[in-house]
Amino acid sequence: MSQVNLKQAYQYCNRTAREHYENFPVASHLLPRKLRRPITVIYTFSRMADDIVDEGTASKTERNLQLQQCRDQLDAAARHRHNTSTDNIAPVYIALADVLQQHPDLLSHLHDLLTAFQMDIDKDRYQNFAEVMQYCKLSANPIGRMLLILYDADTEKNRACSDGLCSALQLINFLQDIRADYHIRSRIYLPEDELQANRISEQDIADSPAIPQLKTLMEFQIQRARKLLQAGAPLGIQLKGRIGLELRMITLGGWIILKKLREQKGDLSRSPRLNNRDWLWILIRAISARFTVYLNTFTKTPKQRQTHDS
């Protein structure tokens, strides 16, 4: 592997990470430089696999075949079997080979991500919340665990917090995009048994009528995601320096999205996103050691919430 090719591969991953909008920071400048490069590689690999699943007009069979090729290329990168002078290798795998040489424990988590993407091809409904959480275990939690490996902070205590935070962020992402997931991807991540218990049909999700049942269901989903967010919040304090600040910002970003969702009162026609004003608020509160206070305000009265926000 030539140094020029490796440099170009990292540059490609960095461009890919910066070209895609995300509600939560991806390898931001808050992180130490040595962490930004592997994080952009992980993000680019995930983005590529996600595009295989969701973009284009390929059949399920073709998408499954492409995902299998991702698995094969990933394993080849882990074994350093690519010949960059003769093989036509995507830049992300050249960078991955370098990252995996330094951090071989990442490999199993990358395979978990591919398993989650496989689920997105083959599964579009979830019978209960346990099935949703199993998806989160494969699609979201591996990201946090890989970051802990890169941070050299992979302890049992940190993993527990990370799993709570990552699962919460995945659930928040689902709640943001309920209608888009249904109309564009024909998926519903809301548990079927909870939809039935609230007498909500798929047509209700498609039409998003202003019915009390949707408000009740969304409030339940929001509160559950908030509790997971709270469970993961201590990670932003346990990890010091810029890494901790980054995690506090990510946590508060999730909290703001939940607030926006709650203010919509069951209206699924809008997908809330973070704006510049939100990011300024997040930065100011993340710097404060009292940032976890804001995660508790869903149960406060309006006057109490105002006191906390001041």
Image (tube, helix red, strand yellow):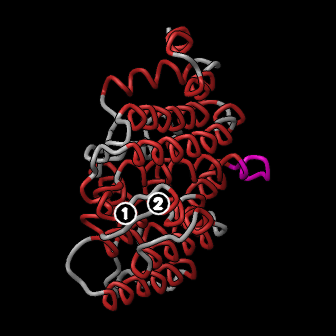
The residue under the point 46% across, 23% down is 283
| In the image: residue 115, left or right of residue 86 | right
Give the mark nearest the N terminus, 2 or 1.
2
Q: Which quadrant of the rendered structure holds the N terminus?
A: bottom left
Q: Position of residue 36 (x, y in %)?
A: 48, 47
- Residue 106's disc number: none
Residue 187 in view? yes
Quadrant housing residue 288: top right
For label 1, count other residues whose C-alpha is less than 10 Å away and answer few (under 14), some (14-19) or many (20+). few
Q: Nearer the viewer, residue 136 or 201?
A: 201
Q: Which residue position holds label 1? A: 201
Q: Please determine whether, in this image, residue 153 is positioned above or below residue 97.
A: above
Q: Nearer the viewer, residue 291 or 88?
A: 291
Q: Tag 1, which secondary structure?
A: loop
Q: Position of residue 115 (x, y in %)?
A: 52, 77
| Numbered range of the magenta stretch | 152-160
Q: Please determine whether, in this image, residue 300 is positioned above or below residue 190.
A: above
- Do the CB atoms of the residues marked 2 and 1 lie less than 8 Å apart? yes
Q: Please determine whether, in this image, residue 79 is positioned above or below residue 95.
A: below
Q: As shown in the figure, which amino acid type bears the numbered disc 2?
A: Leu
The residue under the point 42% across, 48% down is 213
Task: Examine the structure image and report whether residue 162 is included in the region drawn in magenta.
Answer: no
The outermost residue toward the left is 57
Q: Which residue position holds label 2? A: 195
The residue under the point 42% across, 67% down is 45
Q: Position of residue 261 (x, y in %)?
A: 40, 38
Q: Nearer the viewer, residue 113 or 227?
A: 227
The residue under the point 66% across, 55% down is 149
